[in-house]
Amino acid sequence: MSEPDRKSKEEPVTVESALRRAAQALATTSERPRLEAEILMAHHLQKERIWLHTHGDEPVTDPEGYEALVVRRSRSEPIEYITGRVSFYDTWLEVGEGVLIARPETELLVDRAAEVIEKERVERLCEIGVGSGAVSIALARKFPGLKIVATDISEKALAYARRNIAAHGLQERIETRHTDLMEGVDGPFEMVVSNPPYISEDYLLPHSVRYEPHNALVGGTRGDELLKKIILTAKERKIPHLLCEMGYDQREAIADFCREQGLETPHFYKDLAGLDRGFYLRL
């Protein structure tokens, strides 16, 4: 090996050169390859992304380890599972295999719930399907007097929820229960909030979403079955306020079901794309 070749062989991999290669590797599977390369690098080096922009010439510690993260992402594994966290509302939550990744549109559910809680002076609510704890934690942080019982059928999801609740110091105000809907949960409650599974069985999920738990995504043959069960649960237990996220194409089915049950027509709200995304029902 010539001297120039030996020198080139021994040169360390820099932050910038690794980022360029990673962005190229992710270009076919990601709409934002450079951003995702930076997120993975920041996670790998335990630095803020802004640090990468001013330290491009720094050598990368364990470049093979970084490449392994890029390979995982190139195979459509959610970047939140790789980094182990997701940004939701104004905080970070721990996530991983077995728990649904909180989406930005679910922040709208928090906003709508907050409006009802403030207007109706709600003091005690139940969240059905707590997942990572995103909605309950956001609401508990907004309303210091609010008490929440949060349920889920998944022990894996509840383990993440409990860790996130503890990380935010909310153990005394958010109680978690391993149960289906509200089975075995004593009231009274003034409100139910839920982001339940609402995708139909025949819907073709994107590759990255297939990594997430099936029972947190699919709500039945049509997709709206669980939403209807939640409506019936709130009706039977005489809980006056119900707020749910739903699929963009389920407005008519939910409105018809409420009419069949002798309930008021729900107030539907839209997401930032202008699609129907949830409803508030006063029972």
Image: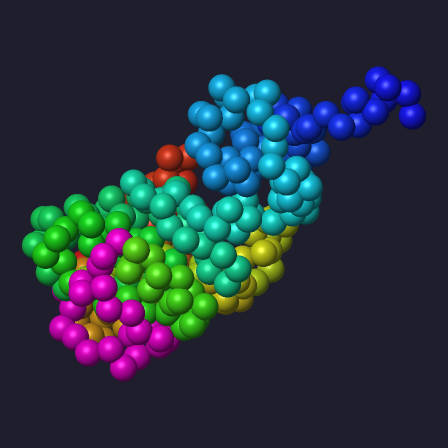
> Hey, which quadrant is residue 193 in on the image?
bottom left
Residue at 84%, 17% (x, y): give it: 4
State whether residue 189 is above or below residue 194: below
Q: Residue furthest bottom?
A: 184
Residue at 52%, 37% (x, y): give it: 45
State whether residue 246 is above or below residue 98: above
Residue at 31%, 73% (x, y): give it: 177
Q: Main secondary structure of the magenta part?
A: loop
**Residue 256 visible in the current orientation:** no
- Could you say which is closer to the camera, residue 5 or residue 165? 5
Question: Residue 18, how many percent across, how many down?
Answer: 65, 29
Q: How is the image coloured?
A: rainbow
The number of numbered badges drawn on the structure is: 0
Residue at 42%, 35% (x, y): give it: 273
Residue 258 within the magenta-colored segment of the rendering: no
Q: Quadrant of the C terminus?
A: bottom left
- Could you say which is closer to the camera, residue 131 or residue 159? 159
Question: Residue 211, how many percent across, how many down?
Answer: 58, 56
What's drawn in magenta, residue-wise?
168-190
**Residue 97 visible in the current orientation:** yes
- Could you say which is closer to the camera, residue 237 or residue 152? 152
Q: Residue furthest front?
A: 3
Q: Is residue 253 left or right of residue 265?
A: right
Question: Residue 62, how many percent across, how many down?
Answer: 64, 40
- Could you say which is closer to the camera, residue 260 or residue 31? 31
Q: Quadrant of the N terminus?
A: top right
Question: Residue 35, how many percent across, how many down?
Answer: 54, 30
